[in-house]
Image (cartoon, helix red, strand yellow):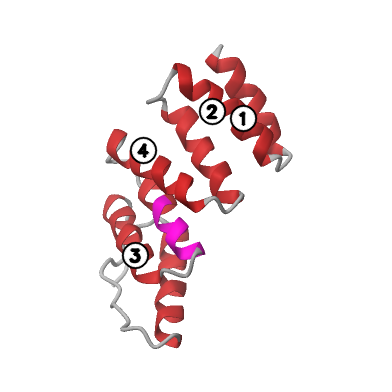
Amino acid sequence: MTRDLQNRAQEHIKRNEWQPAIDLLEQAQQTEPENSYVLGPLAFCYSRLKQHARAIELYERLCQLQPDVARWPYGLGYQYYDQQRYAQAMEHFDRALELDPNYIVVLYRKGYALFRAYCAGERAMPMSVTPAGSS
């Protein structure tokens, strides 16, 4: 049953139909509350609808369930980034980069967050992670 709900939700996600996907994934989560293949897309859909509080809750759970997966702290950081809470975003981006120093999207987002924080007069934090293979 969970697999069918996931497959149907993925079809909605492909069409950017976030709420129908959420409805199906929430049902799937009832059966398998710790399944990252359900929680990940569910968090993503909530993020796309800018329902940050729920997305944060889900990404935090994913970070606990799979602490070695860089995608989860990135997704968590993105929720703060999207709300222009750059200092909080950078904390989670740093964690993602610790797990995967070559995660290009995170490097881009962190650079932009540093720039935006600087423009807003916030104290800029130096980049603390250098991509592997760079000098």
- The residue sitting at 37% across, 57% down in the picture is 102
What is the CA distance from the residue labelled 3 to the residue labelled 1? 29 Å
Q: Is residue 51 above or below residue 125?
A: above
Q: Quadrant of residue 114?
A: bottom left
Q: Position of residue 135 (x, y in %)?
A: 28, 72
Is residue 46 toward the left or the right of residue 128 in the image? right
List the residue tagged with mark 1.
23
Local secondary structure at mark 1: helix
Task: State which tag comes first along the sequence, 3 or 1.
Answer: 1
List the residue tagged with mark 3.
88
Question: Is mark 2 in CB contact (under 8 Å) with mark 1?
Answer: yes
Local secondary structure at mark 3: helix
Q: Nearer the viewer, residue 118 or 25?
A: 25
Question: Is mark 1 in CB contact (under 8 Å) with mark 4?
Answer: no
Question: Is mark 3 in CB contact (under 8 Å) with mark 4?
Answer: no
List the residue tagged with mark 2.
26
Question: Is mark 4 in CB contact (under 8 Å) with mark 2?
Answer: no
Q: Nearer the viewer, residue 26 or 76?
A: 26
Tell me which amino acid carries mark 2. Answer: Glu
Tell me which amino acid carries mark 1. Answer: Asp
Task: Report the span colored magenta.
Answer: 76-82
Tell me which amino acid carries mark 3. Answer: Gln
Majority secondary structure of the magenta segment?
helix
How many residues crowd mark 3 within 10 Å: few (<14), some (14–19), many (20+)? some
Query: Which mark's residue is nearer the viewer, 1 or 4?
Result: 1
Q: Is residue 93 above or below residue 12?
A: below
Task: State which tag comes first along the sequence, 4 or 2.
Answer: 2
Q: Which mark is residue 62?
A: 4
- The residue sitting at 74% across, 39% down in the picture is 15
